[in-house]
Amino acid sequence: MKSNIRQIMVPLLSIVIGLVFGAIIMLVFGYNPIEGYKALLTGALGNPFNIGQTIRAATPLIFTGLGFAVAYTAGFFNIGLAGQALAGWLVSVWIGISLPDSPGWLVLPLAILGGTIAGALWAGIAGVLKAFFDTSEVIVTIMLNYVAIYISDHIIRNVITDRADATPFVGENASLRLQWLTDLTNGSTIHGGIFLALIFAVLVSILLQRTTVGFELRSVGFNKHAANYAGMNAKRNIILAMLLSGGLAGLGGVMNGLGEFRNVFLTNGVAPAIGFDGLAVALLGGLNPIGIIFASLLFGGLKTGGTIMPLMAGVPSEIVDIATAAIIFFVGANYVITYFMDRREKSKLSNTEVIVQGGDD
Amino acid sequence: MVNLLALIVSSTLVYSAPLIFTAIGGVFSERSGIVNVGLEGIMVMGAFSSVVFNLFYAETFGSWTPWLGLLVGALAGVIIAAVHALATVNLRADHIISGTVVNLAAPALAVFLTRVLFEQRGQTDIIRESFGYFNFPVLSDIPVIGDIFFQSTSLPAYVGIVVAFICWFFLARTRFGLRIRAVGENPQAADTMGINVYAMKYAGVLLSGVFGGIGGAVLSQSISLNFSVSTIAGQGFMAMAAMIFGKWNPVGAMLAAIFFGFAQSLSVVGSQIPFIESIDPVYLQIAPYIITIIVLVSFVGKASGPAANGKTYIKSK
C-alpha cells in the first residue's frame, strides 16, 4: 500500500516541482508566470480544437514511451527512439505514396506494418551488437539516430523526390484521420491512431505482466546472469527487447507520418522530438503502460500549450522543455522525494508513540 | 600532394579539438565512477555561453576573445555538470537518467536564453573573433612537415594534445589523481583509507564540466561560429566513444578523438579530395557515426572501464 502511494506521489510531486521551477525561471527573466501558465492551459485544453491537438500530440508519445519501457524492463536504455521513429515515419509514408490507387484496407495496414518493421530493424542493430559484442546500446542507438537523420534526408531529397524539401502527401487510403474525430474537434489534426495507442498500451501491459515472454524479459532485466543460469537465452531476449522497443517507436513515427503530417520532410539535423519525449513520459509514467498514457496526455498538453505561449504571453516555448527536464530530474532523483516522505512518516510514527505512552500513564 | 595532406591534417585537427577536450572530461568523470552521458549537454552549454560572451565582448578583448570564451564555456560546463553531480552523488539518481536530463535541459535552456538575449530569435549572430587558422612561428618554415602540420592549422587542437598529456600525468602520477581513480575502482576501500569519496566524485564530474564546456566552446568558436539548437550534433556522445576507445586514459582518448575528428572532417573536405569526391555525400555524412559504432564493436569487449563505474556509492553510517 505504502509503495503504491509512493508510486503515484513521486511523479505528481515531480510535476509540481518542475512547474514551479519553470515559474521561477519565468520570473527571473521578467516574464509573468501566471500569464505564461494561463496561456499554456488555454493552449492545451481551452477549446475542442486544442483538446484535439493535445490528444494528437500525446498519441506518438504513448508509442515511444511504451517502446522505452519495454527495453528498460529488459535492462536496456534505448535512447535511440527518435531514429527508430524516424525510420517508421519515413517508411510508412513511402509505402503510402507508392500505392496511391490501392484500396485503403490494404494500404493502411501495409504502411503501418512497414513503419513498425523499419523501427524494429533499426533498433535491432543495437540489440544484435549488444547481444553478441556487449556494445553499449546507449552510444550505438544515439549514433544510429544521426545516421537515420542523414539517410532520411537523403532519401527524401534524392530518392522519393527530386531535390524537394518534403514528400507529397499520402492519399485518403493511407491516412489515419477520421472525419468524425476531425469534425468533433473543429478541424484539429487528431487521428485514429489514439485508439491504436490505447490498444497497444493494453497489449504491452499484458505482454510484460502475463506472458512467458514478458517474464523472461523482466528476468533478464533484473539479473542477466541469473536469467541465463535459469535456462533463458539472454542473447535472444536482448534482441527481442530491442526489436519490440524499436517496433513501438516505429509506430510512434507512423503516427506522425500517416496521422499528423501525412508526409515526411527534411529533419534539418534534428531528430523527431517524440524520441526523447517518449523517454521522458516512460520515466514519468513509472514504466507502467497506464502511467505512460497519463504522462503522454500531460506532455501532449505541455507541447501543444507551449506553442501558444509565445503568442499569448510572449514567453519562449522552450520554457516547457525546461520544466519537462526538471520534472524528469526529480523523477530520476526520487530519493530526495521519498526521503522527505519517509521522514514525515517517521515523525508521524514517533508522535503516535508519544501519545500511546501518555495514555499508559 | 603536400597541399592535399595539409588540408586533411588541418581539417582533422579543427574537428578533433572539441572532441579531445570533451573526451578528457569524460575520462575524469568515469574514472571517479560517474557515467556521464550528459557530455553532450555540457558541450551545448559551453558552446552557447562562449558564443554569447564572444558576441558581447569581442570589441573589448579583440583576438583574445575566443580564448577567454573557453573559460566562460568551462564555467557554464561546471554549472550544468554540478546538476549531474548533485543528482548522481547525493540524490542517488541513475547516472544515465541524470545525464539524459542534462541533455534535455541544456539545449532547452540555451535556446530559451538565446531568445531572451536576441529578441526571440532561436539562433545567435555569427561571431566576429573566431579561432581561425594558426601558423606556428619557426616550425611552419620547416619544409613539407611545416606545411602539413604547422601552417594554417588549429591551435586549440595542439593545446588539447598538450592538455591530454598533462591530464595523464595528473591522473597517473599525482595524489589527487590517484584518489579520483581509487574512488572509481573501489569506493568502499577508498572510504576506509580516509578518502572523501563524495568530494572526489564531485571533483571528477566538475572536471568533466570544465573540459566538456571547453570542448563546446572550441566547437562553436572554430566551426559553427554561432549558436543554434543543432550546433552540437552528437559530438558529446562521440567524445564518450573516444573515451572508451582510448581506454579511459587521457592520452588514449585524445588519439581516439583525433581519429573521430578525421572521420568528421571527411564529410566537409571530401569534395576536394580525389577519389573521395566521387562518393555520394550521404555516405561521408554518416561515416563518423558508423565508424564510432564499428570502433565500439571491435574494441569495447577487450577494454573495461573503472570497476565501480555507474554504481551509486552509499556511505554507511
Image (tube, rainbow, N blue to C red):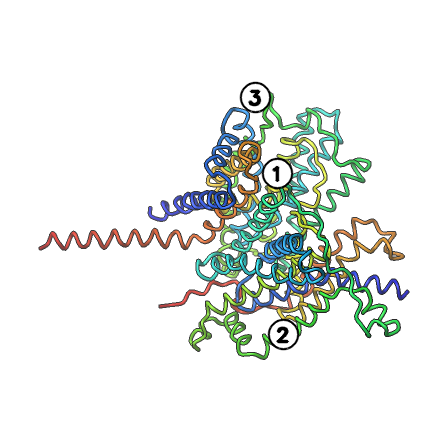
Above or below — where is A273 with respect to B231?
Answer: above
Return the x and y of residue B128 as percentages of the image width and height: 73, 54
In this view, the residue in front, A176 or B278, is: B278
- Residue A31 visible, this orientation: yes
Give the spatial CA distance, label 1 vs label 2. Answer: 47 Å
Chain of the residue under the numbered disc 2 shown in the image: B
- Name the amino acid type tagged 1: Leu
**Label number found at residue A205:** none
Return the x and y of residue B280 as percentages of the image width and height: 83, 49
Give the spatial CA distance, label 3 vs label 1. Answer: 26 Å
- Which residue position holds label 1? A251
Other-residue count near label 2 (Cα within 10 Å), few / some / many at <14 / 14–19 / ≥20? some
- Which residue position holds label 2? B168
- Which residue position holds label 3? A186
Return the x and y of residue B11 as percentages of the image width and height: 79, 60
Chain of the residue under the numbered disc 3 shown in the image: A
- Name the amino acid type tagged 3: Asn
